[in-house]
Image: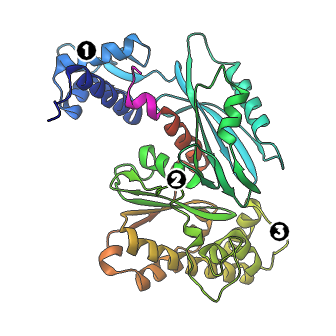
Amino acid sequence: MRAGPSQEEIRRQNLGALLRFVHVRGQISRAELTSELGLNRSTIGALTAELAAVGLVSEEAPRETGRAGRPSLVVRASSELIYAYAASVGVDRISAARIGLGGVIMDRREAERPAEDVVTPLREFIESMEASVGPGARCIGAGVAVCGLIRREDGVVRLGPHLGWLDQPVGAALGEKLPDLLPSVVVGNVADLSALAEHTRGSAQGCSNIIYVYSDVGIGAGIIAGGRRVTGHGGYGGEVGHMVVNPNGRPCGCGSRGCWETEIGEESLLRHAGRSGQRGRDAVLAVVDAAARGDAEAQAAVRHVGDWLGFGVANLVNIFNPELVVFGGTLRDVYLASAAQVRSRLNHNALAACREHVRLRTPQLGDDAALLGAAELAFEQLLADPLA
């Protein structure tokens, strides 16, 4: 019979729970922590003092409350002292940020994605940001978000079809470029990490079951069920763009035919709008703008994509029964322009019991979602065991 957890294990678990709470919720008083975590005042005092001693949080007296008696100290994450680097590799652009504990973006860089090597410019971004870091601050690692299939066990990008990547160890390569700065580099899928960020501190806060559908040329999804990320056995879950919706449809780059991506992806929208020679986010937004200004061909293209968008979402709603569906990347603007078609198709194809409570939303974190999600991945080990 296994013995229960030791006092030391309980203490470390409580330290992690308190730090995670402050990281996600922001500054909070000791009194509120006592109530939220269900621990007594002396335990909360000891835990916050221990975290403060190693520089993970700070404590200070609150501003004037107008109440009698001694005010409870306010606890906040040490964003200036404890930070991670986050990077995002998209089809057209790369970005990087220094993100402090608590999810605060301290610095940011962005550029067009080079055709070949992305590790060198990312290293240069990080070195540039590191030059402005104050004394005593500590980097706990880095997270990288990539549009592609990421093998969970080692972070290798098994396939990035729109990046032209096959078995690319981008995380390991970045770590080798900055061995003295980055103790670890973790890699995840852009849609999955964007879903994590929106769930942690964005439009899906408080929701336990969400689907974040994302487009950057291709289509992917981040899925959270029961408050946990659903990434599958190898880490390749969420490839909803390759859900076959039209068996007699167009060939897909994956080798199949009639994938959802062929109906709602960038290429489909631009082709139906008579702009096949164009590509990229600006081209997609130009079609949405033209539709809003009355261009009949653009309007027909948006309606076509909106109808298929709703068709696929209805399938996902039936399978996962989410309370929230979030449309990110270029799908944000396409959804806003075709919300009537999406909702109509959802109402027609989704089971009433599954659709009756589902809400359709756009991201609160915008283009920063992937970076914030990558940082969450980097912070995970620290939050699980702050004293490790």
Q: Is residue 31 above or below residue 174?
A: above
Residue 206, percent from left and from top: 34, 50
Residue linked to disc 1: 46
Residue 322 can be seen in this image: yes
Residue linked to disc 2: 192
Question: Which mark is first along the chain, 3 or 2?
Answer: 2
Query: Would you say 75 lies left or right of 156 here?
Result: left
Comparing labels 1 and 2, the label whose residue is closer to the camera: 2
- Which of the 4 quarters of the picture holds residue 39? top left
Residue 67 can be seen in this image: no
Q: Which three-letter amino acid code belongs to the residue tagged 2?
A: Asp
Comparing labels 2 and 3, the label whose residue is closer to the camera: 2
Q: Where the C terminus falls, by quadrant?
A: top left
Give the residue displayed 56% in from the left and 41% down from the top.
374
Q: Which three-letter amino acid code belongs to the residue tagged 3?
A: Gln
Residue 125, percent from left and from top: 73, 31
Farthest residue toward the front?
1
Give the residue displayed 54% in from the left and 68% down from the top.
240
Whole-number angstrom distance, CA of label 2 to CA of label 3: 28 Å
Q: Is the C-beta separation of discs 1 and 2 under 8 Å?
A: no
Q: Is residue 297 above or below residue 190?
A: below
Local packing at callout 2 (Cα closer than 10 Å; few below 14, some 14-19, many 20+) is many
In what element is the residue under mark 3?
A: loop
Question: Where does the magenta region start and end?
Answer: 380-388
Front residue of 43/345: it is 43
Q: Is the C-beta separation of discs 2 and 3 under 8 Å?
A: no
Q: Is the C-beta separation of discs 3 and 1 under 8 Å?
A: no
In what element is the residue under mark 1?
A: helix
Q: Which three-letter amino acid code belongs to the residue tagged 1?
A: Ala
Residue linked to disc 3: 278
Query: Would you say 301 lies left or right of 106 here?
Result: right
